[in-house]
Image (cartoon, rainbow, N blue to C red):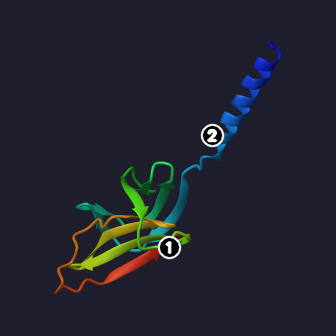
Amino acid sequence: MRSLLPKMLMASAVMLAGALTAIPAMAESRIDVPFDFTVNGKLCPAGQYEVGHDASRSLVTLRTLTSSRQFQWIVGPGEPSPYDSRVVLRFDERNGGHELQSVQFGGAITRRLDRKPRPSEYVPTQDIQGQ
């Protein structure tokens, strides 16, 4: 009976290690944004941004590579297909500038991040896809 206990403990440890390595790490993608834009009222300069997705916590992170500015939102299923693999930043063009409307990472998307346009208001949008 004593020789069985260490074998069971070893098997449990191996199964636990396998389960922990099966949890996906945070996926990341880089996107070049060719214009300045605002997020939650904060100005972000044109440049290269990194979009990260932590599927285990349903979070998406947007951070600039030139400063410490970082934003994080909860994501869920939405308009994109669950099989969509694109990374997309969608912007609304308002008052001569751009406002971040949503962040899509594969089949997960944020809620609307900027003000929803009134029914009589036309607001063009622009999508920028990651690499």
Q: Quadrant of the N terminus?
A: top right
How far from the left and from the top, in percent, is residue 107? Answer: 49, 67
Pointer 2 residue: 20
Nearer the observer, 89 or 54: 54
How far from the left and from the top, in percent, is residue 104? Answer: 44, 67
Pointer 1 residue: 81
The amino acid beneath tag 2 is Leu
The local secondary structure at tag 1 comes to: loop
Disc 1 residue crowd, few under 14, some 14–19, many 20+, Cα 10 Å: few
Nearer the observer, 124 or 24: 24
Q: CA distance from mark 2 to mark 1?
A: 28 Å
Using the rendered image of the protein, determine whether residue 46 is visible from the camera's viewpoint: no
The amino acid beneath tag 1 is Ser
Residue drawn at (66%, 34%) of the image: 16
* Rendered view: 84 above or below 56: below
Residue drawn at (23%, 61%) of the image: 41
